[in-house]
Image (cartoon, rainbow, N blue to C red):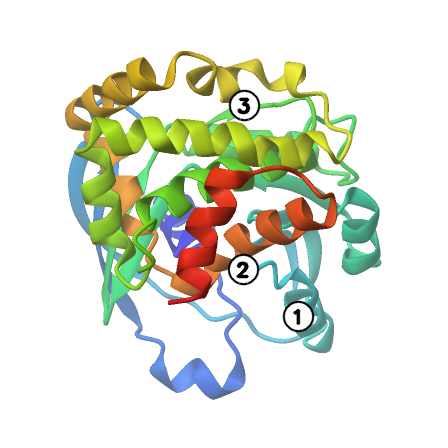
Amino acid sequence: MIGTTYGYVFQKAGHQIEHLVRENKKQNVPAKLNITILDGRYNNKGEEKTDTYTVNLAKPDTSYDFILLSVSRGKIKDAIATLSQNNITGSLILFCNFWNSRKEIEEIVGNFKYIIGFPTAGGSMIQQELNCVLFDHIMLESKEKASIPNYRDLIELLKSTDLKTEVPYDMVEWIWIHMAINAGVTSTAARAGKIDDPKQLAINLMRDSHALSIAVKSVRETVKVVKARGVNLKLYKNELLPYKIPSAVAGMIMKRMFAGNELTSRIMTLHNDVKDIMYGCKSIYDAGKQENLDLPLFYSNMDKIFNR
């Protein structure tokens, strides 16, 4: 959904967008999609818009300025193989979760010049209807850490769509932290052991200040996994600040924030890919066990999900 959401935004700004679809799925791709978007680029509360998006398919042996790679469950290697098989080239933008090290990522992308970013958007697709949320910025690696030759062109592309950039100290570490936070929150939402309806779990969590305070405690545990990887958490104060304040207070603040912020609350309900959610949780769980870390709350909640 991420590729389609940003594809729509880029196409709307006049850019040529094409999607690479596996051969066996091409017949199911509609020529047009109906778009419902809560657009946060021009208004803090977001603007509700409806539109249509023309879907163009990529052809083999094509060179692009940029290839936006957003895959679930860390399946970057498979996606790179598909690009190579189709002889599709261009500067690669990795735009998804992964639990790999930078060295591993470099081995996976091979000859592709790449940059790491991360979306602040979400969506779900039912038949030919895309329901999505878009924030006013994306996360993006600094020019110094990126290997692409057309960094400035990427910034211009984003400016043309009124998208800002936020540049953390290190994008790989930032993604690990993002995954750890999500794992702490998700495991709390599903602490009864059921994770088959993520949307309802998210709604229930956002309405419950006590549950949110438990999520804060769980995140405090899960970020220890990232710290054990050698990451200096002090470099990510903004990301981790909400989890530093007393959990009961944090829970009440978060409940109020979700109730008053449609952008944030809606994006919480749009990530419904259970396998992708579990990929993130299991990555943190396995790494914590491997490091013999003491994460009682997180492990307990995850074990209930595993044993269901």
* Residue 166's disc number: 3
Q: Residues within 10 Å of mark 3 (few under 14, many from 20)?
A: few
Give the structural element (helix, strand or loop) at label 1.
helix
Which residue: 42% across, 67% down?
A: 56
State the image coordinates of residue 228 (x, y, percent, origin top left).
73, 33
255, 135: nearer the viewer: 255
241, 189: nearer the viewer: 189
Q: Quadrant of the C terminus?
A: bottom left
State the image coordinates of residue 247 (x, y, percent, origin top left).
37, 19
Q: CA distance from mark 2 to mark 1?
A: 9 Å
State the image coordinates of residue 123 (x, y, percent, origin top left).
32, 51
Report which residue position mark 2 lands on.
71
Say whether disc 3 or disc 2 marks the residue closer to the N-terminus: 2
Give the structural element (helix, strand or loop) at label 3.
strand
Which residue: 32% across, 58% down?
A: 272
140, 223: nearer the viewer: 223
Q: CA distance from mark 3 to mark 1?
A: 28 Å
Residue 35 sits in quarter: bottom left
Q: Residues within 10 Å of mark 2 (few under 14, many from 20)?
A: many
Q: Are marks 3 and 1 in contact (CB under 8 Å)?
A: no
Q: Are marks 2 and 1 in contact (CB under 8 Å)?
A: yes
Say whether disc 3 or disc 1 marks the residue closer to the N-terminus: 1
Residue type beneath disc 3: Glu
Camera sees residue 171:
no
